[in-house]
Amino acid sequence: MGAFGEEKDPALCRMLGRPEFPLLSRKGDIIIGGAFSIHSHISQPSLTLTDTPKPLICSRINLREFRFAQTMIFAITEINNNHTLLPNISIGYQIFDTCGSVLPSMQAVMGLMNGQEKTLGKTCSGQSSAHFIIGASESSSTIVMLQISGIFQIPVISHFATCACLSNRKEYPSFFRTIPSDYFQSRALAKLVKHFGWTWVGAIRSDNDYGNNGMATFIAAARQEGVCVEYSEAISRTYSSEQVERVVSVISKGSAKVLIAFLAQSEMSIFIEEALKQNLTGLQWVGSESWITASHLANRKYASILMGALGFTIKKTKITGLQEFLYNVHPSQNPQNKLLKEFWESTFDCSLEPDVHDQTKCSGSERLQAINNSFTDVSELRISNNVYKAVYAAAHAMHAMLKCEQQSDVVNSSCRWQDNLNLKKAVEHLQNVNFTLQSGEKVYFDENGDPSATYELVNWQRNEAGDTVFVTVGSYDASLPNGRQFTMKELNITWKSGSSKKPQSVCSESCRPGFRQAVIKGRPICCFSCVACAAGEITNSSNSAECSRCPLEFWSNEDHSDCVPKVIEFLSYKETMGTLLSAISVFGACLTLGVLCVFFWFRQTPLVKASNSELSFLLLFSLILCFLCSLTFIGEPTEWSCMLRHTAFGITFALCLSCILAKTITVVMAFNADRPAHTVPQCSAPFQRTSVLGCTLLQVVVCVLWLTISPPFPNKNTAHATERIILECDLGNSIGFWVVLGYIGLLAMLCFIFAFLARKLPDNFNEAKFITFSMLIFCVVWVTFIPAYVSTPGKFTVAVEIFAILASSFSLFFCIFAPKCYILLLKPEKNTKKHMMGRE
């Protein structure tokens, strides 16, 4: 049966067994087989080693699946009445019941392939009964059918088998479907869950190929979206009540508030009954296309549980004339057909048999127009449209295969009939079909036999009459770029149990900006603790996995939610310390200026003359500069202020100490000279001026070289303090600074030595002891300044340097000039020549 007309192996025929009879059939040139789950319940006969297995008995007619079968008949009837599609070719059908189970599906495909002959000879030859097969409604049943029909390349077009595994062209080369693969639906569900911020969900699936493959794809996609699955339970309609009860109990004890239900309708019906018994409420249901638009579930009985459910389904459409066709279904069409009788009796709850007690007898005049059930409801034609498309796809493939389109006379066109149809070519032509239905929908298959993956997102809402309706609130198109695949409409969504507030389903509460997620050992990644970002790091969004470090010149704010410019630190005039130091500097300069005025006023007195008035005035002037040079250290460092502050400091102190050194040398030389004791020592003014000029000029040369080679410059120090920028003056070449400072220290030591040598001079004229004491304080200040300067950070470095300048300046001022001012202002009687000569 590989190519029709070939002889078949007798052993294979015996393996196929006794063929089943179709529930609905019609003869035709081309036979399209149908496999639908027309019954939803199947008996489970006991199996023993000694007894012949009893035949499987299917019961409980599924009105929705029966509508699928009638839709197939409607499409075939429509094509037979169409003179442009397969002209002069009639299409027949054979429809079998798979009962939604594997064994009946195997029997159905055998019946479709073998025909209805009950005798088996040594060989079974002849053409297969069906040229195409529409079905089945379940992935597992479809896989079983393909494992048999695929050997003979019989094209199978499924309207409802969504397992992603069926896209494997190597394993299923003759399989096509008009419903998208679960691969896309599972990924769409993961994006839906992520869109609403649900990172902690539960999952339940059908324990078959449909549920297991679909859930595996969802879990993998959810993991990529950062969504965790708390539990994943499986359920089958063959499970015992205790097993179903256990599954519902696990779900009710879970902490997830969102339940992903990847269930076939049969499992969903069993599960929802048990959920109703255990009062499983408060869950946000997210369903697969198998049940999300099932009208028999959308009743008031299950509204308390399922209201607000969300799920993806294929687009709905209208099939013109289908409702009228369904209304005309009647047992009188084929009085011997048991299925039509069963349908009629189930729909109207009556009996067509005359001798049935305790049941109303059917009159036959009942009207389907008065009934509103899953069979007559055509408001949500989604899967039925897939059946409709599948039939038309088969017809278009045969139309191309029989070269019907090559006839020149369109009115009297006919197809080139072939007695032995090669179904391998039928598969090739089916792969290439591309047509448009009357509704405007295009039908084609990709290289895997799949249609384009487009879905509608539906939400279970209640209308004004209190009935459940499926409202489209979004869409998903897998053909679009990743960021544009999922879209939401501006509609109000009804949430779980009819609530208007979106539920939250997370394992851990969101980490607000400023915190990062820290994984809890032994728990899924969605369960975490919130840890505050370290200093200098931020997170500006919720649920950040890592903290981001701020750029170099920025720092985190108090909430660690944003990077703000670092505080620029420098000693400013506006802050307390800067104001205080400025005031002290100005005060010292003013005080020195006042003493200068006093000395100028008393310049003709013996004390001022004895103090070497020229050097004293120069010393007072240099002290004023020493006080004022500290002001250059305050304020924002600039290129000029950085060069000025250190050079001004070095030159002014060199001038000051040069004056003191000249004064002490003069005193020592004068009193150690061979002169009468009663004369006032005098030294040549040129020597004093030369020594002061020479000592100061040497410091000037050092400063000029420093500024020429590598001058100080303003620098933003970000290494010392991470949370702030210290605006400081970089020394440039630090050797220049230490040479300047060392030279000042050398002058101070020379002053100290010469002053120490003059310690035994007459007391009334001995200012050497005051100079000695001032130099001692000066040296102590600057010796302690060095370690404090090196170790003090930021603006306090500048403050320490200013303090050293002021402390040393005040020590020189008070030690040298305070005693003299005391005599000039308070003890004028001692300001005499005799007292200066020590004769009083």
Image (cartoon, grey):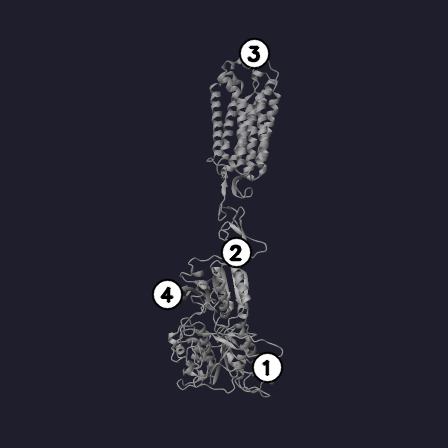
Q: Earlier in the sequence, mark 1 or mark 2?
A: 1
- In the foreground, 736 or 815: 815
- In the foreground, 186 or 450: 186
Q: Nearer the viewer, mark 3 or mark 2?
A: 2
Residue assigned mark 3: 839
The single residue placed furthest to the left in the displayed view is 464
Residue 800 position in % (x across, y down): 54, 33
Q: Earlier in the sequence, mark 3 or mark 4?
A: 4
Q: Residues within 10 Å of mark 2 (few under 14, many from 20)?
A: many
Q: Earlier in the sequence, mark 2 or mark 4?
A: 4
The secondary element bearing badge 1 is classed as helix
Residue 76 position in % (x across, y down): 44, 80
Q: Nearer the viewer, mark 2 or mark 4?
A: 4
- In the foreground, 146 or 585: 146
The amino acid sitting under disc 4 is: Ala
Quadrant (top left, top right, bottom left, bottom right) of the N terminus: bottom right
The secondary element bearing badge 4 is classed as loop
Residue assigned mark 4: 465
The secondary element bearing badge 3 is classed as loop
The amino acid sitting under disc 3 is: Arg
Q: Which mark is residue 15?
A: 1
Above-or-below relation of 834 to 295 = above
Quadrant (top left, top right, bottom left, bottom right) of the C terminus: top right
Q: Residues within 10 Å of mark 1 (few under 14, many from 20)?
A: few
Mark 3 and mark 2: Cα distance apart in space: 101 Å
Q: Are marks 3 and 2 in contact (CB under 8 Å)?
A: no
Q: Nearer the viewer, mark 4 or mark 1?
A: 4
Q: Earlier in the sequence, mark 1 or mark 3?
A: 1
The amino acid sitting under disc 2 is: Cys
Q: Are marks 3 and 4 in contact (CB under 8 Å)?
A: no
Q: In which quarter of the view is residue 744 placed?
A: top right
Q: Earlier in the sequence, mark 3 or mark 2?
A: 2
